Amino acid sequence: MEQKELIPHLFRTEYRKIIAVLCKLFGIEHIEIAEDIVSDTFLAASELWGLKGLPENPTAWLYTVSKNKTKDYLKRNALFVQKISPAVKYTSVKSEELEIDLSVKNINDSQLAMMFAVCHPCISTESQIALSLNLLCGFGVDEIANAFLTNKEVIYKRINRAKEKLQIEKVKIEQPALTEINDRLATVLTTLYLLFNEGYYSASQDEIIRKDLCIEAMRLTLLLQENDNTNTPEVNALLALICFHSSRFDARTNDKGEMILYDDQDTNLWNDELINKGAYYLKESSKAEELSKYHYEAAIAYWHTNKNDTKEKWETILQLYNRLLQIEYSPVTALNRTYALAKANGKEAAIVEAEKLALSDNHLYHSLLGNLYTDINDEKAVEHYQQSFKLSKSSIDKTTIAKYINKLQTHKN
């Protein structure tokens, strides 16, 4: 990998790890100092590597330099040392002797601690996701703004207010106690679920799938699954759901980035390894005393990886949707159910149920009705597709919808 590609890659993979360790060391009130130290490390890398070439082990170089910069900072800032001394047990210890542990275990422990701190209920869900993307995933403000179709000033303020709130509440970055895990795990899972969903069906104008968001959601959920205290049935169910959905990534879009509907996907492009992993985590999740929404969604996603288009498959999916809606109603879930209903009981039955939802401001609602009315009432199908085109914010979506409209109008003529 060339230097111009390597540094952004390492920034994505290593920045978040060093940040987590330093934030755990310094405390939530000194996040900015940790960010400055790590940013300076990457700035030094871009300057020195350009002059002297790549070091033998770039990752080890980053870790060593960040450790040295941290010790230098502590040496120069006696007041800061006094403030954080209870946290780092820094009394008579010299800065050069201070252990800054960047082992795999401590990085994972620090990221887990950071995850529970960031998902503290004192800040909003939107702020939790933005801060998670920033601190846990290494996303910049511009990237986060692009992902959520807003301007960077909004994201910048959201992140800063969240940090301030965590500081005011004196939230600690530490291994959560069992009571905190029980109280806060649902919030953590919601954040990871929303993070994955944003990637799986991106709001970006230029991308249908943001694989980088999906990968980060999978990585962070895996951290939970690999920790004995957070390895719960719900965590396994969410991980199974992520694996099943991710297994069909390559089949969901064409080479132009346009969406390919489920019925038209090339099943040979489905990732069997991810499907098998999903099946493993789904089995692990079955130890639950009570099934969560993640269990039902994972089961639905599992059946979607079944390549046989049978009536049993779609009737099973339909029943799973019915149970999911009973425990947590969502208009989007109800909309997705109508597709399964069409496959199990026919388009006419699905149209009746879909129109009851009356999601007139949702472009996916009109897109689904366009699909359902095709070959039944093509004129209505065009009307719904045209409305979907108007409501969609994605240029790629608009291109795909325009093709359906053109096909129907061509067929009519």
Image (cartoon, rainbow, N blue to C red):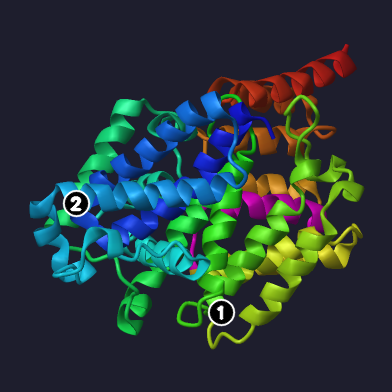
Left or right of residue 172, residue 411 in this image: right
| 15 relative to 288 in the view: left or right | left
Which residues make up the magenta segment? 328-345
Instruction: Using the image as rendered, state which of residue 312 and residue 351 is in the foreground.
Output: 312
The answer to whether residue 238 is above or below residue 307 is below
Q: Is residue 335 magenta?
A: yes
The residue wearing badge 2 is 75
Q: Position of residue 409 (x, y in %)?
A: 81, 15
Residue topped by disc 1: 233
The residue that appears at 50% across and 82% down in the rendered structure is 228
Look at the picture and state if 368 lies above or below 241: above
Give how far apart the Cα atoms at labels 2 and 1 are. Answer: 46 Å
* Residue at 45%, 54% in the rendered image: 17
Viewer-closest of 111 and 250: 111
- Please provide percent x and percent y for residue 209: 64, 38
Residue 64 screen position, x and y as percent? 44, 51
Q: Identify which amino acid the numbered label 1 is placed on.
A: Pro
Q: Could you tell me which secondary element the residue under label 1 belongs to?
A: helix
* Circle 2: residue type: Lys
- Asked if disc 2 and disc 1 are in contact, CB closer than 8 Å, the reply is no
Residue 356 appears in view:
no
Q: Earlier in the sequence, mark 2 or mark 1?
A: 2
Which quadrant of the figure contains the N terminus? top right
At horizontal 32% and vertical 56% (from top left) the residue drawn is 22
Quarter assignment of residue 297: bottom right
- Disc 2, SS: helix
